[in-house]
Image (spheres, rainbow, N blue to C red):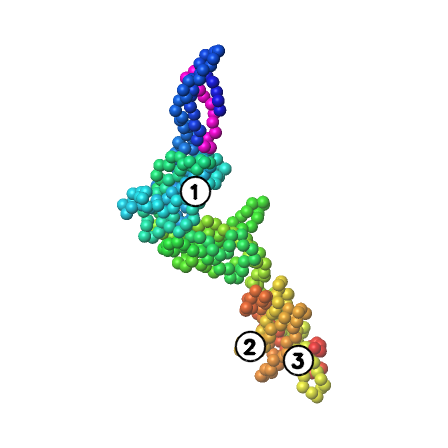
Amino acid sequence: TISETSETQFKLSLPSSSPRYWAVQPKGPAPYYELGTISSIRKVIPDNQKTKPALHLPLSSVPYHGLPVTFIWKKVSGAATYRVVVYNKTATGACNTASVFWDNLAPGVNFNSGFPDYIGVEIDQDGIAGSPADKSGKCWTVTAIGSDGTAGVASDLGSYAIGPSKPVLLSPAKNATDVDFQPTTLSWQNEWTPNGYTLHVLEQHMENGFTIMKEVGGGNTSSTQMTLNLKPSTSYHWNVEARGTDTTNMTKSASSDFTTEQGCTPIASAPGSLSPGLTGVDELDNVSEYVCYVQPQNTQSPYTPYYRLQWQPVAGATSYQVKVYSFGNGSTVFSQEYTAAEAANGVVVPHPPQQGQAPYEYGWEVRAKNSCMSSYGPASALRYYECFACFTNCGGYPVAPH
């Protein structure tokens, strides 16, 4: 830039991305405009080389927890990048600028939209947050660097203390899907060993357009994992809190979400609408429809009586277990498993061998299970029937062949 002025000062705007140099040369009057001797050359220092970055976080008054450590400072106009230096502290807690822990250039990223004048960088390196043997913390400075590599003035020294590290969630991974639900194992790790952990697991669902969260599991543990039985096809939100010696030393992990796999829910209800469905043996008196089916071969040969037991199917059931008990002594006289297809129209139960005189009185129950279950669910309420031993003439009681 070449400009003329009759004054002894001159103002102009220059780019701040790199240094500029200037000099003054006197010029004589018309008509000759003779030029005098040029002055010595001076350097113009742009803002990024004369402004100290103002440090924002971490603060010396608040203990920092775990990795990564986020360093935030105020932007310097014209800076192309920044030099971040982290220093160790002495045993007395003083900044030891002769002991550099970390020294690197960091372009920086915007802090967030609410703080457009601030920029920062996360440093995820073992030891940057301290260690059990070094709880005094560390110090740090930031220097703005111009596009030509010229360094500005370093910021004042900042410092931060070291507190218990935050747990880091490992599994399930963030936003994972098709996670096993029975059981689900949640695991995490921590740089230090606290007094214990508190796991929070919240179930998420939509209600009237809002996400509703309800805590459904977790609790205290000294381990770095916990196994829970969760629901299928359900979204969950979870985090872990490390417990120190008091409430001021409690640190919480970042939160994460996952969705369990599709699957069936274990059956928690018993089959209903049992037939025969008498609730007590006394009801059997004079009830002619509760008599055994009989399959007579002929009047001179032994017979094989049967009874058909039926119930309301249980949604999702893959099999059923039927048990028949002697009313006299409560012993199990018949036990059989049936697939859902085999039991679709009820099951035919043979008349168990009995001692004494007919009629024989029985109680029975049924249980269901599905593919999620290794054992059967709850039993139905006990119901009763009685069985008569007869051939083709049953004294007026109905007889039907199997």
Q: Amino acid at mark 2?
A: Thr
- Label 1 and label 2: CA atoms lie apart by 80 Å
Q: x, y percentage for residue 105?
A: 43, 42
State whether residue 89 appears in this view: yes
Judge by depth and name the residue closer to the eye, 334 or 288: 334
Disc 2 residue crowd, few under 14, some 14–19, many 20+, Cα 10 Å: some
State whether residue 248 appears in this view: no
Q: Is residue 331 above or below residue 77?
A: below
Residue 332 tag number: 2
Disc 3 residue crowd, few under 14, some 14–19, many 20+, Cα 10 Å: many
Residue linked to disc 3:
305
Q: x, y percentage for residue 327?
A: 56, 76
Q: Is residue 49 left or right of residue 296?
A: left
Which marked residue is nearer to the observer: mark 1 or mark 2?
1
Q: Is residue 91 magenta?
A: no
SS for callout 3: strand
Tell me which label, 1 or 2, sits earlier in the chain.
1
Tell me which label, 1 or 3, sits earlier in the chain.
1
- Label 2 and label 3: CA atoms lie apart by 18 Å
Q: Amino acid at mark 3?
A: Pro
Q: Is residue 249 above or below residue 12?
A: below
Residue linked to disc 1:
105
**Magenta residues?**
7-18
Disc 1 vs disc 3: Cβ atoms closer than 8 Å? no
